[in-house]
Image (spheres, rainbow, N blue to C red):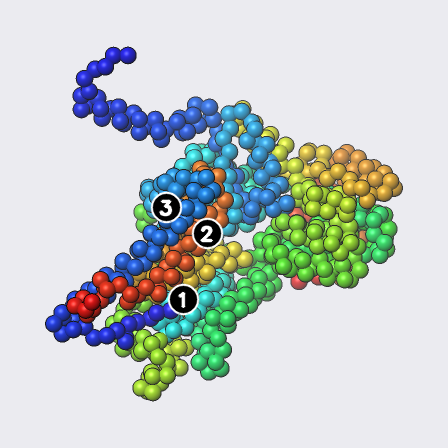
Amino acid sequence: MSISPLSRRGFLNGTAAVAAAATLPRFAMAASHAPLTVGFIYVGPKDDFGYNQAHAEGAAAVKLMAGVTVVEEENVAETIDVQKSMESMINFDDAKLLFPTSFGYFNPHVLETAPKHPDVRFQHAAGLWTDGMPANIGSYFGYIGMGQYLNGITAGHATKTKKIGFVAAKPIPQVLLNINSFLLGARQVDPEITCQVIFTGEWSLAVKEAEATNALADAGCDVITCHVDGPKVVMETAAGRDCFVCGYHANQSPLAPEKYLTGAEWNWAGVYTGMVQSVLDGGTIDNFVRGGLADGFIKMSPLGPAVSEAARVQFEATKADIMKGGFAAIKGPLSDNKGNVIAAAGQSFVEDDIALESMDYLVEGVIGSTS
Amino acid sequence: MRVSQTSAPAARPTLGLGLAVVARRTEAVVLPLGALLVGFAVFSVFLLLQGKSPAEFFSLVYRGGFGSAFSWQNTLSRAAPLLLAALCVALPARLGLVVIGGEGAIVLGGVGAGFAGALLGGAPAMVALPLMLICAMLIGAVWIGAVGALRHFRGVNETIASLLMAYIAIALMNHLVEGPLRDPESLNKPSTAPLEEALRVGNIPGWDVHWGLAFGVLCCVLAWVLIDKTTWGFAARIAGGNMRAAQVQGLPVGWLVVGFTALGGAFAGMAGFFEVAAVHGSANASLAGGYGYTGILIAFLARHNPLAIIPVAILLAGFEASSGLVQRRMDLPDATVLVLQGFVFMSILISETLYGRFKAFAPERWGST
């Protein structure tokens, strides 16, 4: 190495290079090794044992893929915050594929942001993409009601009081379908079983979730499940009251290993890696995607130690039925709990029936009201 | 909280009144800025304990909040509702009232605007928008004005009353948007009927920031004029200094209390109007976004001076705008920015006890030893 006289210009070039070297490597590497940046946005904490954790587990699987950089943000409100978080990922991280995962992000936030960024793909969980919406938006979801139906079968075998309980956030179609499926699953075991539901009114409100769980236990429910963002409080409270529990969103068995029967889980890892792979391959993703157990969109937690042999046999048989496709939990003759006919004898709503996505009733046997 | 320095000792005639005023104004700027820096310093220690670089943190905050046109628009979009929410705290504070329930007026104002907008479908925007705005402001004014009335006529503590009423407001909003006012088409996110495109408030031309920002700044200026330049504001400051003395002087204390709380509530209701008309397009549970609570922090940091609310709101909005970038680049949880806000808030509150303690800001004591 020779030492040359240092000119002012050379010095400036040198310092500029050092400065550039100090700031650039991360971005330069990102540019050369990661042609695709994928952004995930969660409405709550990503370790909530629930909705957000299920999505974060999917993101973690995407992280392991070659040629992909994952950026994540948690606790992003369904306000202008999420619009700006998405645009920040586009502006600062050059994200080309976004997964804003909360239902409330869809309208208006995703719908308004997507047209401004036509080269970015917005994949939204649970939204209802319809013709006429921007083509760079996709919506996807899974028939997790089937998971609650299978939960119901284990619950039907486990209950001694013939009363099972459901802690629910809001009386909206997705939640109502889960409640109804849970009871109808249990009634496959014993048609005398009833299910009491308590709505907390909020997606995440630990105090009310605990109160609701205790109230259900006080009312004699001895198997409890839920549909709130983070089932942790419900699981721990119910197990503390010596009730059996069925999980939802993610695997909650570590919270109550002895009392956990099974759980209806999202399987976003498979779904997300598939979607990211098709973008990497230059392919397209359909604007409207739905899938169930057979498609790998949902999965069941491993059966817990409290599940009896009879329960296991019926659980596996029903699961095999569902895997064949065309399964209907909602089928006639069926009335709602106010006496209105939902399905006449012979009529059924198969799992992928779009009518189920606007459900507004609780079936006969559910104790509770939608309003 | 400290509202005014009415009992400050008279400046020595030889030094002149002007110097004393300048010194006190300087104190009012230097102390909060110093407290801000102390807050940053304590937070830096916190970051170091976590093994993270404070320099990287603050450079990301700058980049995410203020470093580019996008960052500024991100920051200003978030500042818009905060300006109005902070006024809901600052105005009653001039009367010595600590009102912390502005969130309630925001959500109910938003529901009012959404409902009015749904009723006024088909009406020209020039008619419908002002009506929606008035509806939102009236609801906000009644909601927070009721807190003032409870305080003045029944002696109910306004802090507790406003906080509890905020919970009632959110429950009421949930009931309304999930029940009587629900658009049956809003399946999984119960909302009022979507506003027609003509009834949506757009962006300030050339910016990706909605008109709520301009209204927020305007309202801050108007509130400052009201407090600093009118006899009502003067009367309010007197009452804030000593309620009993104001009563003895014959000031209409009851009207002042109800009027100032109602005005603050009207501003919060306006924030709800912009959330619905400019951001959400309908009223739903997303209205409870916590702006009312951030507004408390801003008003206290601004020492309840409406003009100071503008820069403070922009600063805090900038923190929030950068929080995503901080999460993504430094792998810090989103609560990091809340921790920073907490340190700054504590630091500013502690600095309140320092007013009048530094001789440098008290010309009348310069001669003494």
Q: Position of residue A32 (x, y in %)?
A: 43, 23
Neighbour tally class for label 2: few under 14, some 14-19, many 20 plus, Cα within 10 Å: some
Q: Which image quadrant is residue B57 in?
A: top left
Q: Element type at marker 1? A: helix
Q: Could you give the CA–CA distance between mark 3 and mark 1, rounded to whole angstroms?
A: 25 Å
Q: Element type at marker 2? A: helix
Whichever of callouts 3 and 1 sits on the residue coming sooner in the sequence is: 3
Please state which amino acid type lies under the numbered disc 2.
Answer: Leu
In the image: residue B293, left or right of residue A215: left
In the image: residue B250, left or right of residue A226: left
Q: Which of A328 and A43 lies nearest the eye of the viewer? A: A43
Please state which amino acid type lies under the numbered disc 1.
Answer: Val
Q: Which chain's residue wears label 1?
A: B
Of tags 2 and 1, the one toward the viewer is: 2
Q: Which chain's residue wears label 2?
A: B
**What residue is pinned by disc 2?**
B338
**What residue is pinned by disc 1?**
B89
Q: Could you give the CA–CA distance between mark 2 and mark 3, rounded to whole angstroms?
A: 15 Å
Q: Could you give the CA–CA distance between mark 2 and mark 1, rounded to whole angstroms?
A: 20 Å
Q: Residue at x 69, y 33 (%)?
A: A295
**What residue is pinned by disc 3?**
B65
In the image: residue B266, left or right of residue A338: left
In the image: residue A130, left or right of residue A310: left
Q: Residue at x 29, y 65 (%)?
A: B357
Q: Element type at marker 3? A: helix
